[in-house]
Structures are given as structure tokens and as C-alpha cells.
Amino acid sequence: MLRKDIDKEKEVVQCMIELYCRGNHNPQKNRLCVQCQELSDYALKRLDLCPFGNSKPFCSNCKIHCYRKDMRIRIRNVMRYSGPRMLFYYPHLAIRHLFLGITRKERRPK
């Protein structure tokens, strides 16, 4: 995965967390609540520190789970809520993310 791809994945994660926060926590406009900001910061840091670097798969397809257990549960909840809504709020990101997910499954690190 090129650096540009990691930046795109960061954008998708950010959008998903924003959708989740807006729908569940009702924060001030254009701001995340404290819990969602913490999750966002953690997720972006994990992407930056991924041991696979340029050959990074999606986290859901990875054999190494570098998220702490509590954060993994939180990000799964975010993705479960935001995933279907991405098609309505960010259709271009959702379609690109789905396409990349399908094409990258074969590149899964062993």
C-alpha cells in the first residue's frame, strides 16, 4: 500500500468515526466528542505505525491485530454503524473502499 493509499484509508476511517459520533453522541457541529476523538487519534496512529507499511492490507483482513481489545471493539461498533451509511454520505469513498477491499484480499500478508 502506498503512502497515498494509507492517507485514503485514514480519510475513510475519519469519515466513519464522524458519522458514528454525529449519529450517536450529537457533538457540536464539526467536532467529535471526547471518546470519538480518542478513537480517531488512536486509529490514525495505528495506521501510521502499521508493521506492513506499503504492503498493508485492510485491518479486517490482517493476521496481526495491533488494536488494543477495547479499541478494537469500539472501531467495530463504528464500522458496523457507519458502513451502510457511507453509501449515502460519502458514496465515492464507500465505493472505492469496497473495490479496494475486494482487490486486496489476495494480497493478505502471511
Image (cartoon, grey):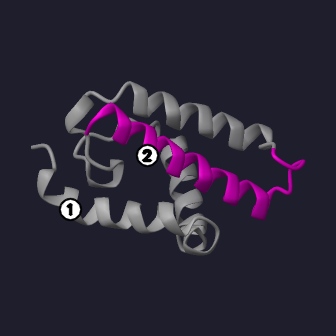
Q: Nearer the viewer, residue 64 or 49?
A: 49
Query: Does 22 appear in magenta?
Result: yes
6 vs 62: above or below: above
Where residue 39 appears, x then y in whole percent?
61, 39
Left or right of 55, for residue 58: right
Residue 103's label in the rendered image is 1
Residue at image position (20%, 62%) is 103
The type of residue carrying mark 1 is: Thr
Q: Secondary structure at mark 2?
A: helix
The type of residue carrying mark 2 is: Glu
Residue at image position (35%, 42%) is 5
> Does the image show residue 52?
no
Query: Does 29 appear in magenta?
Result: yes
Q: Earlier in the sequence, mark 1 or mark 2?
A: 2
Where residue 106 appears, x then y in whole percent?
12, 58
Q: Which stretch did the figure color magenta?
A: 1-30
Where residue 16 appears, x then y in whole percent?
59, 56
